[in-house]
Amino acid sequence: MTLTVSDLSITRGGIPVLEGLSFELPPGKALILRGPNGIGKTTLLRTLAGLQPPLEGTIEGAEDQIAYAAHSDGLKPTLTVTENLMFWASVFGTSGIQRALDTFDLNELAERHAGNLSAGQKRRLGLARMLVTGRPIWMLDEPTVSLDINAVQMFADAVRAHLGQGGSALIATHIDLGLDGEVLDVGPNKAKPKPIDDFDGGFL
Amino acid sequence: MIALLLRDLKLAFRAGGGFGLGLAFFLIVTVMVPFAVGPQSSLLSTIAPGVLWLGALLACLLSLDRLLALDWEDGSLDLLATAPLPLESVVTIKALAHWLTTGLPLVLAAPFLGVLLNLPVPGFFWLVMSLLIGTPAMSVIGTFGAALTVGLKRGGLLLSLLVLPLYVPTLIFGAEVARRGATAMEVQTPLLMLAGITAATIALLPFASAAVLRINLR
């Protein structure tokens, strides 16, 4: 299903950050989200994932389709890698975590507690969660933080495989993943401060 | 839903999960009371139902700030909110897990601690019954408080201030059932009130908890 965003305006803490944003994300395509720090990339992803309502505009095709990976991976340190993945597989009603373990080279770590993993290994586990959700649209917020070159390649391969199976991905990242995807620069959609109206101007 | 319940139980029982914290507090409070009020067995048996109920209530309160805060801190609350489970189910399961790891152990421990306070023999049954009926309400109300304060730094104090007044009706009727039971009086009225409070909180509060959680996750 194509994700269609029309004339979207979003806020963070009540302050408008992006306005008039429109784009489409069809199946099989990746969209790389670019823009300077603080412009609202995370807020945009959270809005699309349904964690906060938009100020204006419409989002079509997102209902129960999006798997969201935030800055925090939602891992439980006292559960093993397998238990963490099994939990999310059960929540999303999918079965089997072997493909996720294979894709992100986690087989050797399968019985290790998540609390004993390195930052990069935790990130790989967090990204492996996307595979067990079974959702077609991936929303990834800075997915390559803490990953080494091999792991970045592993992640890029996983995204390519996902796109090849008819999935799509919206990825906020500052590095080149070598993906054949379009770039969505949100810079021009930065919300402008409201002009001072006559009443406020007169008061000032 | 079952997966979430099993995960929360597993997390509670593993190292640092906090299982037994409320139980230890309940034990300490009950053991300390005779030192504070003196060893007269008649006085102890008079105050036993109230002290046991108050101890159980405070023990329940102790573990509430961890109820949603841990999931908030590690980001899993955000991920759960985007999962197919409705947030109403998530908070209900959270409350159930809290009751199974905190409320139920208190119910089971209460008769043994009743012996320490010389609780009259007819009171044991009604103490257990009142706690069994009343503690689920405390977990559900506590989950509502935890949802209100999730994400706030040092939200534990605010959580206590918000939740304690909501606990008062449960405490009044719960302790009254145990007190009347201990003195072989009729318990039907406070028991029905207690059951009514529990039924109403279980039926209504998950919706309120989910609604405030949605706002807090923004």
Image: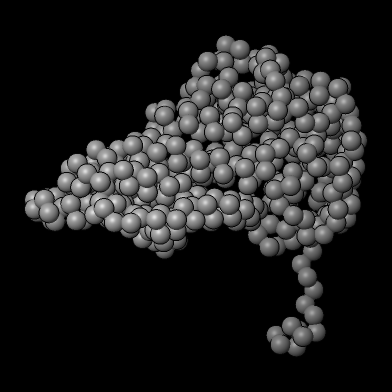
Residue A193, visible in the rendered structure = yes
- Left or right: B129 as drawn, with respect to B113: right
Figure check: A204 above or below A8: below
Taking the spot 46% from the left edge, 41% from the top edge, the residue there is B98
Q: Residue at x 62, y 53 (%)?
A: B207
Q: Is residue B139 above or below residue A95?
A: below
Residue B12 occupies quadrant: top left
Q: Position of residue B81 (x, y in %)?
A: 66, 43
> Within the image, what quadrant is residue B121 found in?
top left
In terms of image quadrants, where is residue A183? Answer: top right
Instruction: Check the image and name the residue furthest to the top.
Output: A108
For the C terminus of chain A, give its image quadrant: bottom right
Q: Position of residue B134 (x, y in %)?
A: 42, 50
Residue at 67%, 43% (x, y): give it: B86
Q: Say which of B127 and A32 sits in front.
A: B127
Instruction: Tell me residue B122's x, y (percent).
Output: 25, 46
- Residue at horizontal 24 percent and vertical 54 percent from the top: B183
- Compared with A45, A98 (above or below) is above
Pick whichever, A37 or B179, lies toward us: B179
Between B20 and B193, the residue placed more toward the observer is B193
Q: Is residue B20 left or right of residue A84?
A: left
- Is residue B145 visible in the rendered image? The answer is no
Please state if B138 lies on the left or on the right of A197 as rendered: left
